[in-house]
Amino acid sequence: MVAVALALAGLTGCTGGATTEGTRTTTQGPPTTLAPTTTTTGVPAVAVGTLGVGTRTDQYVDTSRPTPPNGGAAGAPSRTMATSVWYPAAAPAGTAVPNAAPDPTHGPYPLVVFAHGFAVTPPTFAALLTRWASAGYVVVAPALPLLNGDAPGGASHADFGSPNLTDLGFVISEALRRAATPGDPLVGLVDGRAVAVTGHSDGEVLAYDLGFAPCCHDARVRAVIPMAGNLADALEPPAPTGVPVLHVLDDHDEYDPYPASIAWDRQHLVAPRLLLTLVSASHLPPFSRPSDPHFDLVTRGTVDFLDATLKQRADGLAALAAVVTASPSLATLESDLP
């Protein structure tokens, strides 16, 4: 799917330590709607924590492309991604149970693909991704080759960019294939017409590219949530794809200075866009630690946005705005919406 190799210098984001690092365009005419560009099945919205959650780890293997040698570790003729999956399940509400039986009651559910950042793995974000699933989403998060913290030879940016974008395109295809395969644990659970791509730090650049980059836009993507970084690192101004975007930024991000990040958004992103700034927040905790004061706001706000864009929940964006308004010391929100 992705044919253009992106320049490494602009895609590395900030890569300090062992954590993730991750011309003005004027909107013409009235802001566009946040409704998805295809009709979904009208999946009902449910509150965060309403549904039980099952978890599983599947091996997604793309045999068409190699993994290069890395840090003294040998390469491979294919790309194998340990892929964590969270899904609504027949389990007590608010709990996550390994390999629990899927619960199709409120399905089929939209698919949310999550891209992690540098030197971590998807379970770093388990608390957030569990909550998304508890609100009626199937969440699929691959450990991207070389980028993840368990990569043979150590986490590396050696093939960051086009190879990882192709990885994510493959993951979307593979998740949809599995959900349509008789006998698969998730068969019938996924609405393939309602797909969002999300990501943190380096992963947010990948999510942005699949939604907006002229080189790499994936037409299956109906909503994008980039989190914690500077979208200028993608080196691609957005094409007018009409995909709704919720960019979540930290105003005390230690890797991507906030003034430059928000300035790029204001100059380049066009409607339908929402810019959620977390006040006095740093790079990783608001997305990984339930004890962080911003975590619940991030959870509720992202679910409201997904409900509005993928489930056509009429009050979803108003609910997101209300969450922010109720917590002015934690966040601010900018949008192009009336």
Image: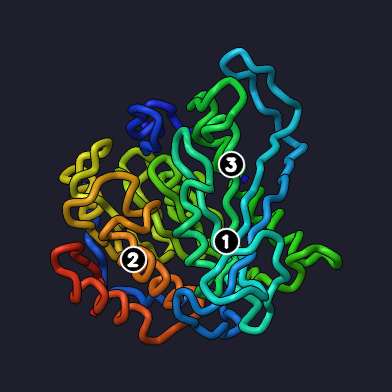
Cα separation between marks 1 and 2: 18 Å
Which amino acid, by three-letter code, is at mark 1? Answer: Val
Q: Is residue 232 left or right of residue 41?
A: left
Q: In the rendering, which numbered label is found on residue 2? A: none
Q: Name the residue under label 1.
A: 139
Q: Residue 135: x percent and y percent?
A: 50, 74
Q: In which quarter of the image is residue 86?
A: bottom right
Q: In this view, does 281 lie to the left or right of 145?
A: left
Q: Which residue is drawn at 73% across and 66% down?
A: 186
Q: Is mark 3 on a helix, strand or loop?
A: loop
Q: Mark 2 points at which residue?
A: 296
Which residue is nearer to you in this view: 103 or 214?
103
Determine whether 16 is above or below 324 in the image.
Answer: above
Which residue is nearer to you in this view: 268 or 16?
16
Q: Which residue is drawn at 57% across and 80% down?
A: 39
Q: Residue 47: x percent and y percent?
A: 45, 80
Q: Residue 166: x percent and y percent?
A: 60, 42
Q: Residues within 10 Å of mark 1 (few under 14, many from 20)?
A: many
Q: Name the residue under label 3.
A: 143
Tag nearer the camera, 3 or 2: 2
Quadrant in which the C terminus appears: bottom left
Cα separation between marks 3 and 1: 13 Å
Which residue is nearer to you in this view: 119 or 168?
119
Determine whether 65 is above or below 200 in the image.
Answer: above
